[in-house]
Image: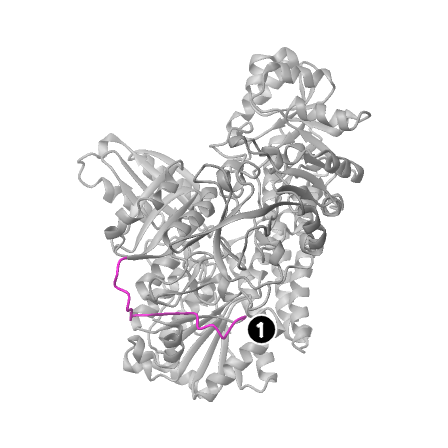
Amino acid sequence: MSKEIAEAIFDDSAALGAPRSIAESPWVVMKFGGTSVSTAENWATIAGLVKRRLSQGLKPFIVHSALKGVSNALEDVLHAAVLSDPADKLASIRAQHYELASALGLDGAALLDDTLHELDQLVAGVRLVKEVSVRVRVRIMALGELMSTRLGAEFLARSGLPVQWVDARDLLVSQSKTGRNAVNEQLSATCDFGPNEAMQSALAEHGKVILTQGFIARNKAGATVLLGRGGSDTSAAYFATILAARRLEIWTDVPGMFSADPRVVPSARLLIALHFDEAQELASAGSSVLHPRCISPLREYGIPLFVRSTAAPEIAGTVVSSVTEEVEPQVKGICIRNGLTLISMNTVGMWQEVGFLAKAFAAFSDNGVSIDLVSTSETNVTVSIDTSDGMLHEEVEASLLHDLEELCRVRVIANCSAVSLVGRKIRTIIPRLAPALEVFEEERIHLMSQAANDLNLSFVVDREQGSRLVSKLHASIIRKEGASTVFGASWERLFAADGPILRDADTWWMQKRDQLLKVADGQLNAYVYDRESVEEAARSLLNLKSVERILYAVKANFNAELLRTLAATGVDFECVSPGEVEWLEEIFPDLDLTRILFTPNFAPREEYEWGLQKGLQVTLDNLYPLQAWPELFAGQKLFIRVDPGQGRGHHEHVRTAGVHSKFGVPRFEVEELVRLVEAAGAEVVGIHAHSGSGILDPDNWRSVAAELVQIAAHFPSVRVIDLGGGLGVPEKPGDRTFDLARLDQALAEIRESYPQYALWLEPGRFLVARAGVLLTRVTQTKGKGEMRYIGVGTGMNSLIRPALYGAYHEIVNLSRAGEAPSETVTVVGPICETGDRLGSDRLLPPTKEGDVILVANAGAYGYVMSSNYNRREVASEIVI
């Protein structure tokens, strides 16, 4: 189905297979997500859309979410209220709503103060009892939608629209089902739906545009319940069936469903038309555009669904209906779904035992836990459960495991992701997919499942492998142009202007483009580092009020000029080898060695002895040194690196915690650690952890700090909690920057609760990654079928991260930055390896031999990991 057809049938539900009663209905449900309702500009667009529906003789019914980020902010308030005073967080929520009200020309205090006072009162109760009941959680989380819809209704009314604000709890009633635990019934409720003529008549009597909330409903006792995170889509679907609406329009921040998440794969293609079952599979497999639960009610009553973008209303988007012209076997999407937990049940007793699965599944049912994927063998059954929304509470998990352990041996594998290939007749094209599936060759696959409806093939892997696998699979399977009519333009092409793509003002390499082109003149390859960017990054961390000390991880980049720059700002150093320490001593002959934290890993005895003799602060990261060489540590003050339990980061190889990591003392060995420290006569003065790299969630460090504080309680001499590094760096244009203010707030709560500890951070990439670029020149261009290659002067010998980690680095034709991008290409180096790719499916302007290519975010783990493989020279280093 072409884009033109999708636009033409927007007002023709009959063409989409809807029953006559649906196709002729005057009602149209319009759902707007959090991003859509968070700016005055978007509200002007919404008012225009509603006026257009009215001019068409339709009855708009508006459902919308809380403002962007408010639901997360309310969760933060609940968490903070148990530990300390969340006044700053409450003030931030108030300010966000008042700022939008002001931008809309409204009196925020008059509209919202009663609701904000209720929020204050509920939070005060949480602070008093130091715990959050499910009932209070529900009441607080519901306030986000109640506040945002008050602003929306008032603005539309002042825009000349006849609007009636309605409380969704007067319209939606949740069901009570056997086999569901009480917590789920309050936090992830299912509601009654289907045509309701009495409600249609009552709402029609208003003669106005109805505006109500998503996400909330009431139970039969009248208490507020929630529909689960992302539940506003489901609310809108319920309302569409109740009203027998001619269509549901979901307006979000992306113009439809794509063949992959565009944030991970910028070359992902718009899916113009999908059948209900395909959309259901995509949503269930992890496509974040739609909540999976919203599809089923619409499919049951044949109500078409249109997915559009408030920011780009001119793009036709995706239409989901019971009609599809696509019957050929093909993959339409590569999805990733995070937050899965596997339950592996193992016993030889299940072989040919009648009723084992019935007993095992009854345990899940009795505990109200829904099973997702299933894999079986003669002696093992492994199932996945979705824990992404926090529905599996500890007591429920404990009860489930207790029941299962009466039947078999049970193993829990947490923090997994399902990577899914979604399409039609997947079984018939598995031979064609075989080359693409080679990406799993070196990965740990916990479970593989082929859907009974033949719409998806899923692989459950460790979470941090997921994004890289999705990117590689998409490049191998989804064609870049042409192919089926279901595919539209790529994300990059939809949002690429006819002119040049403008860079952000803080992109130093565009501001200094002329200088970089002069540097590139006369040499083939060069790493270029911007001193000002390093200084700026260092100052941003040194200004954190909650952190006492910043130590730079020297392994990220040991360029002498950059080390001098960092030292001058007041940043100290973390070293992992004698060579790094000696390099610092060479650069700084008078360096105070107390500025160095020495953290060797699986090093020989001589390195620990060397470090102690030099008077360095030494970190131990496993029990072996204390078990084998206790005499080394008698009378020594030590840091201990512990494993916080779950690694995080952008790739499995950069996660430095978790069961599969070689780093740190695990929690279950802490008691043995205490015994060994005492036996050696040592003293633990610092507890250290490092979760990984590329982590963009500031709350990660709150969780790590809370874990380390518990371990520190075993050692009365501890004065330092070293939270490690891993602060994320934006990789792609449009990626959010790391929220340092939020990190400071999170750590301030820890400092307030545990003032006896000083907090340290050990950033590496954050300080230098954005400050470095790799400049190279185009050597050749090549077209091969639909593939286009740009060959450049260096590759994995200078920058191995894309080949090793699947890391994404933005690539720009610096010579032609003023030209519009129009070609999708793969950028490759001269190394004799298939994996020598710096980037796949990149949108660049027409590129010629001799053009200067810039690879961004190359300041960390670039030159330091380079080699002379193939006897090729590594790019030189230049500081500007």
Q: Is residue 254 above or below residue 399?
A: below
**The image quarter in which residue 198 lies:** bottom left
Is 325 in the magenta? yes
Q: Is residue 259 above or below residue 372?
A: below
Residue 376, image x, y percentages? 26, 40
Identify the residue shown where x is 28% and y is 45%: 361
**The image quarter in which residue 410 lies:** top left
Is 8 in the magenta? no
Residue 638, image x, y percentages? 67, 23
Disc 1 packing (10 Å; few <14; some 14–19; many ≥20): some
**Quadrant assignment for the C terminus:** top right
Identify the residue shown where x is 60% and y is 79%: 155
Q: Nearer the viewer, residue 803 or 792?
A: 792
Which contiguous range is marked in magenta?
311-329
Under mark 1, the amino acid is Asn
Residue 257, image x, y percentages? 42, 63
Residue 387 visible from this viewpoint: no
Residue 336, image x, y percentages? 42, 51
Residue lying furthest top in this view? 631
Q: Main secondary structure of the magenta part?
A: loop
Which residue matches tag 1? Answer: 42
**Quadrant assignment for the N terminus:** bottom left
Q: Nearer the viewer, residue 406 or 32?
A: 32
Residue 136 visible from this viewpoint: yes
In the image: residue 282, left or right of residue 771: left
How many numbered marks, from 0 up? 1
**The image quarter in which residue 610 lies:** top right
Identify the residue shown where x is 60% and y is 37%: 861
